[in-house]
Amino acid sequence: MGVRFDQQDAITIGSLSGEIDGKTSPEIQEAFLPVLAESKVLVLDMKEVTFLSSAGLRMLLYVYRQTQAGDCRVALSGLDEQLRDTMTITGFIGFFEVYEHLDEAVAALKG
């Protein structure tokens, strides 16, 4: 599991990798705390996420709720077919703007 943050213009990009499960999601959530307090536009790039458990879904819900409380826009990019299906079936996909590629998400959120 890994999480890395970059800035592109006024957009914070959180790049996630590996498995997001009960063991790793608390670490990811903790890494997001300072970012969520400062960001107004956030893209979670998930192209390198290999597994997302229910704990991972809860972590995404936490991120979503924090962004809404702070009046921040949040989007996901790079969901593979399995992750997209899981998020669609569980209804989580509706919380986020979703883009196939990171550059599409950044371009859409700039305007």
Image: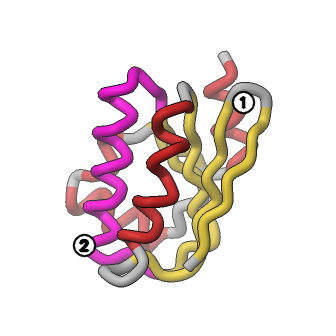
Range of the magenta residues? Answer: 51-73
**What number of labels is visible?**
2
Left/right placement of residue 90 relative to residue 3 reads: left
Q: Residue at x 44, y 70 (%)?
A: 27
At label 1, which amino acid type do we have? Ala
At label 2, which amino acid type do we have? Ser
Residue 10: name its quadrant.
top right
Q: Residue at x 35, y 66 (%)?
A: 85
In terms of secondary structure, where does tag 2 sit?
helix
Left/right placement of residue 21 relative to residue 35 reads: left
**Residue 65 in magenta?**
yes
Left/right placement of residue 57 relative to residue 28 reads: left
Q: How is the image coloured?
A: secondary structure
Q: Main secondary structure of the magenta part?
A: helix
CA separation, marks 2 and 1? 30 Å
Which residue is more in the foreground, 7 or 18?
7
The residue labelled by disc 2 is: 54
In terms of secondary structure, where does tag 1 sit?
helix
